[in-house]
Image (cartoon, rainbow, N blue to C red):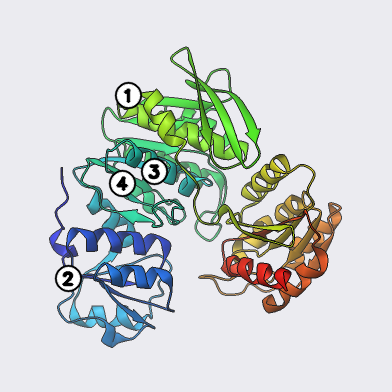
């Protein structure tokens, strides 16, 4: 098993070390014995976790944070060219390594599972990490969110399996050469990097084409984009294709998904045998994620019944329909959904889990480019809620686009029959929600930005 530190990674410096993807790589390197350093815009629990592993974490970005003896500087696509630490790296002739290349180097020599798709990557990767750990296989993993169980997004294990979330947003997943690739779905997103579905398909084809000879592609038999991709890659002679889903043609067929409150019972047909197991999060889409994880594990040679039982130990990922608490009879749940498909899936899951409850959504749009292209569909998704509060757009890495505001979503939501309140000051949201909510209601904070911070504040306001 390979677990040595690549020479270039012996003393890495991460710009934006607190990010979900960056911090995972930094944690694994620190656990392997590298002298990890980096910087981030603000203090966080992630920064403290990295320090506990021996990493040096600076707050703020400054040229002086980069040590003269750094062996490389690791960046993500979100780091701007004028970052002072990046400028200093050029002055010192320190190699600059993209996050995806760093992750690819950590997977070298291991049996890698790379989980891709427009939606569901973090959940599916997490399910595999938990199940393989439960089975005593001690995998390494790098995930785009923190597990509820182990409470981390990455770990160096002593086993020979590495499970990684494979990000398509900047084409970085094309750097990996996994033994097993999972493609959950293929849709148009990340509009700043992809101009059309053809570009998306080309990118996914390149990713699938990197699967090691004799390796396996696990892919949805139901989602139209995945079905199209399957047709495009069927001629790759060295690739084993395993489909999963409710389609009668699926190799691993989802026979039934039975809601059980905030959990689901899933029955699949595999090798002409029925297999039933529990998924500890609600919603058909999460059940399908678990079936994809099951199929991937089986492709590695793990007995299906053992894996199914272990998948039942998965308790969730932070921000994926995560229960934040309850106050005055009102439950507050956090959702990372930011694409219309994800929003619809999570709202339908909550409807199925608590059919008699009123559903109140606090939605924060993520990215101007996404809102510009999909604002109408986001608004239509919000029509599934009883009441919605819509915040201003969370810009993340983007600059504002003239004419693109949350009003695009609000107008579409109202046109679809939704009751929507626009709130421009995020700090007032707890008061607004407290004025709307009643005992028995569910409040869902939704979005990929800092809307997640509102959950505790809403609970505190409700308590008072």
Q: Which residue is mark 2?
A: 71
**Mark 4 = which residue?**
176
Residue at 42% x, 78% y is: 43
Quarter location, residue 261? top right
What residue does disc 1 label? Answer: 237
Rounded to the nearest angstrom, the CA distance separating label 3 from label 1 is 32 Å
Seen at 14% across and 78% down, the residue is: 69
* Mark linked to residue 130: 3
Q: Residues within 10 Å of mark 3 (few under 14, many from 20)?
A: many
Q: Is residue 132 left or right of residue 267?
A: left
Q: CA distance from mark 1 to mark 2?
A: 40 Å
Say which element carries label 4: loop
Query: From mark 3 to mark 2, how far is it between C-alphas?
Result: 33 Å
Q: Is residue 279 above or below residue 317?
A: above
Up/down of 274 relative to 302, above or below: above
* Percent of width and height locating residue 333: 64, 56
Does residue 456 appear anywhere in the picture?
A: yes
Question: What whole-number distance in Å separates the C-alpha atoms at marks 4 and 2?
Answer: 22 Å
Q: Position of residue 259 (x, y in %)?
A: 65, 34
> Dot 3 lies on which element?
helix
| Badge number at residue 425 | none
Q: Residue at x 39, y 43 (%)?
A: 130
Q: Residues within 10 Å of mark 2 (few under 14, many from 20)?
A: some
């Amino acid at each position: 098993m390979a677990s040595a530190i690549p020479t270039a990674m012996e003393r890495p410096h991460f710009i934006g070390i607190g990010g979900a993807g960056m911090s995972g790589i930094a944690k694994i390197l620190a656990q392997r014995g590298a002298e990890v350093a980096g910087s981030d815009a603000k203090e966080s629990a992630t920064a403290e976790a990295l320090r506990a592993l021996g990493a040096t974490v600076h707050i703020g970005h400054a040229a002086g944070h980069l040590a003269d003896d750094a062996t490389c500087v690791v960046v993500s696509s979100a780091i701007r060219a004028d970052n002072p630490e990046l400028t200093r790296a050029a002055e010192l002739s320190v190699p600059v390594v993209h996050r995806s290349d760093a992750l690819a180097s950590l997977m070298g020599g291991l049996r890698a599972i790379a989980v891709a798709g427009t939606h569901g990557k973090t959940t599916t990767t997490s399910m595999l990490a938990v199940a393989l750990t439960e089975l005593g296989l001690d995998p390494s993993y790098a995930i785009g969110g923190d597990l509820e169980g182990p409470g981390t997004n990455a770990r160096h294990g002593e086993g020979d399996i590495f499970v990684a979330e494979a990000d398509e947003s900047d084409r970085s997943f094309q750097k990996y050469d996994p033994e097993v690739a999972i493609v959950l779905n293929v849709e148009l997103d990340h509009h700043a990097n992809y101009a059309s579905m053809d570009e998306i398909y080309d990118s996914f084809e390149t990713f699938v084409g990197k699967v090691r000879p004799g390796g396996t592609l696990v892919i949805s038999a139901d989602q139209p984009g995945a079905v199209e991709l399957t047709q495009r890659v069927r001629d790759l002679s060295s690739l084993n294709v395993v489909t999963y889903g409710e389609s009668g043609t699926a190799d691993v067929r989802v026979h039934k998904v039975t809601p059980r409150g905030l959990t689901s019972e899933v029955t699949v047909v595999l090798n002409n045998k029925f297999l039933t197991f529990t998924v500890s999060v609600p919603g058909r889409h999460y059940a399908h994620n678990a079936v994809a994880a099951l199929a991937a594990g089986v492709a590695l040679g793990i007995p299906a019944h053992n894996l199914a039982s272990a998948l039942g130990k998965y308790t969730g990922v932070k921000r994926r329909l995560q229960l934040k608490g309850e106050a005055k009879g009102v439950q507050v749940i956090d959702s990372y959904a930011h694409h219309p498909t994800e929003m619809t899936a999570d709202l339908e899951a909550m409807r199925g889990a608590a059919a008699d409850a009123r559903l109140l959504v606090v939605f924060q749009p993520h990215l101007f480019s996404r809102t510009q292209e999909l604002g109408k569909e986001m608004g239509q998704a919000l029509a599934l809620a009883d009441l919605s509060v819509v915040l201003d757009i969370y810009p993340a890495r983007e600059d504002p686009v003239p004419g693109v505001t949350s009003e695009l979503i609000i107008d579409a939501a109202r046109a679809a029959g939704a009751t929507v309140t626009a709130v421009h000051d995020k700090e007032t949201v707890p008061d607004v929600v407290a004025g709307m909510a009643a005992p028995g209601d569910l409040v869902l904070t939704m979005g990929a930005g800092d809307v997640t911070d509102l959950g505790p504040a809403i609970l505190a306001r409700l308590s008072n």
